[in-house]
Image: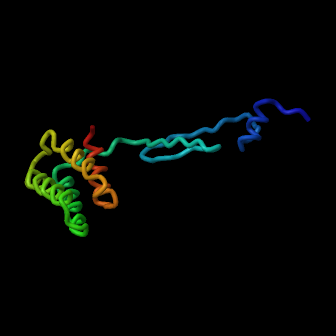
């Protein structure tokens, strides 16, 4: 029995030979991943997360500050502690995040990446900074 090129392709790639394609109905507010043969495409569908407010950013800065206490004291940690304390002071009671503050925090996390990489609090703060844009 001879098979068509499409049928052979479907057989080799785990598909069916019915000639029908994959159909995805309405997808909202979710993520899904499609892949095979070492190729994966992930699609996130839904509204972008709202930018954090000053209170949420302050909480993330304070969480990172608290996590740093468990690390050995050194010049890098002291400099980062100082930077985080200054940022926390600017965020306390603020109605909005001052322009440039997100970039300043991003630069600090980048500068002291080897110090903060193992800390989950740094990852959480980084995610908030991404949602601020830039």
Q: Identify the residue shown where x is 50% and y is 43%.
A: 42
Looking at the image, residue 44 lies above or below residue 83: above
Residue 37 found in image quarter: top right
Please, which residue is most extreme toward the front here?
75
Q: Position of residue 93 (x, y in %)?
A: 8, 54
Q: Identify the residue shown where x is 21% and y is 49%.
A: 108
Q: Identify the residue shown where x is 12% and y is 56%.
A: 82
Q: Nearer the viewer, residue 57 or 100?
A: 100
Image quadrant in which the C terminus is located: top left
Q: How many marks?
A: 0
Q: Position of residue 33 (x, y in %)?
A: 53, 46
Looking at the image, residue 123 lies above or below residue 2: below
Q: Position of residue 124 (x, y in %)?
A: 30, 55
Image quadrant in which the N terminus is located: top right
Q: Position of residue 116 (x, y in %)?
A: 28, 57
Residue 102 horizontal side relative to residue 18, left or right: left
Q: Nearer the viewer, residue 35 or 106?
A: 106
């Amino acid at each position: 029995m001879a098979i068509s090129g499409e049928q052979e392709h479907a057989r080799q790639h785990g598909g069916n030979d019915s000639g029908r394609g994959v159909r995805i109905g309405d997808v909202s507010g979710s993520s899904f991943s499609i892949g095979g043969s070492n190729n994966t495409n992930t699609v996130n569908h839904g509204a972008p997360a709202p930018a954090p407010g000053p209170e949420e950013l302050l909480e993330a800065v304070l969480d990172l500050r608290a996590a740093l206490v468990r690390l050995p004291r050194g010049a890098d940690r002291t400099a980062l502690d100082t930077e985080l304390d200054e940022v926390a002071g600017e965020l306390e009671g603020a109605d909005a995040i001052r322009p440039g503050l997100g970039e300043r925090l991003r630069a600090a996390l980048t500068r002291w990446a080897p110090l903060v990489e193992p800390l989950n609090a740094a990852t959480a703060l980084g995610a908030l900074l991404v949602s601020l844009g830039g």
